[in-house]
Amino acid sequence: EIDADSPAGKAGLREGDVIQEVNKQPVKNAKDLVAISQKLKPNEKILLRVYSQGRSGYVALEPK
């Protein structure tokens, strides 16, 4: 479940969305997502490529 007040929720991400890229780096599985996330700097803006409802598009996140 995605908290509506979280950065992901505010960006419109929904349960079931598939993250394909983080800041132009491909994400093939959860291990990739964790590895990329650990390299992010505090308060760094994040650009996600997300597959949602049959379409792929970009979503920008601003960490709290």
Image (cartoon, helix red, strand yellow):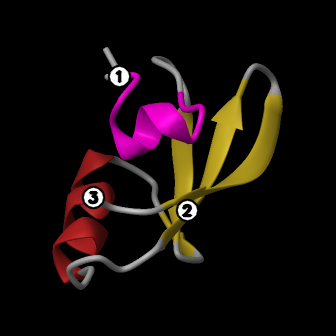
Q: Earlier in the sequence, mark 2 or mark 1?
A: 1
Numbered range of the magenta stretch: 4-13
The residue beneath circle 2 is: 21
On screen, residue 51 above or below 46: above
On screen, residue 35 above or below 63: below
Task: Please provide percent x and percent y for residue 41.
Answer: 24, 85
Q: Quadrant of residue 45?
A: bottom left
Q: Is residue 11 magenta?
A: yes
Q: Residue at x 59, y 77 (%)?
A: 24
Whole-number angstrom distance, CA of label 3 to CA of label 2 = 20 Å
Q: Residue at x 35, y 22 (%)?
A: 2
Q: Quadrant of residue 48?
A: bottom right
Horizontal side, residue 61 vs residue 31: left or right = right
Whole-number angstrom distance, CA of label 2 to CA of label 1 = 19 Å
The residue beneath circle 3 is: 64
The residue beneath circle 1 is: 2
User: Which kind of residue does numbered mark 3 sit on?
Assistant: Lys
Front-most of residues 19 and 13: 13
Q: Earlier in the sequence, mark 3 or mark 1?
A: 1
Q: Earlier in the sequence, mark 3 or mark 2?
A: 2
Horizontal side, residue 48 vs residue 38: left or right = right
Task: Please provide percent x and percent y for residue 37.
Answer: 26, 67
Task: Please provide percent x and percent y for residue 18.
Answer: 54, 35
Q: Residue at x 45, y 54 (%)?
A: 28
The answer to the question of whether label 2 and label 1 lie on touching residues, with beta carbons closer than 8 A, is: no
